[in-house]
Image (cartoon, helix red, strand yellow):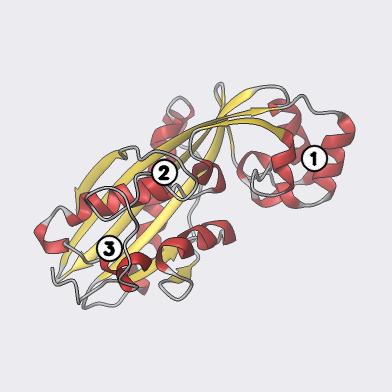
């Protein structure tokens, strides 16, 4: 792949948080945003395997906007799906304030997992590949009072967020411990995405097709750190960790 032939990049998401996180890697003008129309209902077998669900939904979101990409040339789609898991319950986005209040009461004083599946779908000269991975973070809530929960629900913030809270916003006051990537809790683990780009570009057909669009390559000033031209930690100081996942030829 010629580094001078970068992919047209798209984020398949309606989340402003994912848009903001991706902008730190590619710049605000480095990609366009499309809203995928995907049924996010868990399949019966996924109640016991939420990791499978978030990866499946991320892949479906990427595929849902594939028709909007140019028929020729290089393009890439980034998609993600985030859910909160406690025991055998998968907590998606609450549909009503009452449901949000019930989720907060369920999470109060407990540790839960935040799972994000990330999918990267790319095309070059008719060759299409999908790679995907997952990131997991443990989050512990404080013991919440009725007044705290009622106030937080009244702000409206919980209604568009998995698990009915946003750790990057007012919901951060409800959280005692975040063990793992904060990016993951926000909805787009950048470290996982960068590792997926590495995996995809390990194929000769895709070498440089996405990484050439990264800000530090566009600006000619790679950060100090590892031999791959990336930092030894992510933007929030977390050590690099390999992305688990699969690669698929389409």
Pick whichever, 63 or 172, lies toward us: 172
Q: Earlier in the sequence, mark 1 or mark 3?
A: 1
Q: Which residue is mark 1?
A: 98
Of discs 3 and 2, which sits in the foreground?
3
Res. 162 image quadrant: top right
Q: Residues within 10 Å of mark 1 (few under 14, many from 20)?
A: few
Measured from the top left, where is residue 131 in percent x and y? 27, 49
Q: Nearer the viewer, residue 249 or 226?
A: 226
Which element is circle 1 on? helix
Q: Quadrant of the C terminus?
A: bottom left
Inter-mark Cα distance, 1 to 3: 44 Å
Relative placement, left or right, of 172 versus 156 is: left
User: Which quadrant of the figure has residue 49?
Assistant: top left
Q: Determine the residue positioned at 49% across, 28% down.
A: 47
Q: Which mark is residue 205?
A: none
SS at mark 2 in the image: strand
Residue with the mark numbered 2: 117
Q: Earlier in the sequence, mark 3 or mark 2?
A: 2
Relative to 174, residue 196 above or below: below
Residue bearing mark 3: 211
Q: Residue 193's spot in the image, x, y percent?
A: 36, 51
Whether residue 232 sits left or right of residue 35 in the image: it is left
């Amino acid at each position: 792949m010629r580094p001078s032939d970068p992919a047209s990049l798209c984020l398949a998401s309606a989340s402003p948080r994912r848009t903001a996180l991706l902008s730190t890697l590619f710049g605000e003008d480095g990609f366009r945003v499309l809203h995928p129309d995907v049924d996010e209902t868990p399949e019966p077998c996924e109640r016991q395997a939420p990791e499978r669900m978030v990866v499946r939904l991320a892949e479906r979101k990427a595929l849902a906007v594939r028709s909007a990409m140019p028929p020729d040339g290089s393009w890439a789609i980034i998609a993600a799906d985030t859910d909160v898991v406690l025991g055998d319950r998968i907590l998606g986005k609450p549909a009503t304030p009452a449901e949000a209040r019930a989720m907060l009461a369920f999470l109060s004083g407990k540790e839960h997992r935040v799972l994000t599946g990330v999918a990267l779908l790319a095309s070059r000269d008719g060759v299409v590949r999908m790679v995907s991975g997952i990131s997991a973070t443990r989050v512990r809530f404080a013991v919440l009072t009725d007044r705290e929960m009622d106030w937080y629900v009244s702000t409206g913030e919980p209604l568009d967020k998995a698990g009915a809270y946003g750790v990057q916003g007012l919901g951060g006051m409800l959280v005692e411990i975040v063990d793992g990537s904060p990016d993951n809790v926000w909805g787009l683990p950048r470290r996982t995405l960068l590792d997926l780009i590495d995996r995809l570009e390990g194929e000769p057909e895709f070498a440089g097709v996405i990484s050439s669009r990264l800000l530090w390559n566009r600006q000619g000033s790679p950060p100090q750190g590892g031999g791959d031209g990336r930092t030894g930690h992510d933007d929030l100081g977390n050590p690099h960790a390999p992305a688990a996942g699969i690669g698929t030829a389409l």
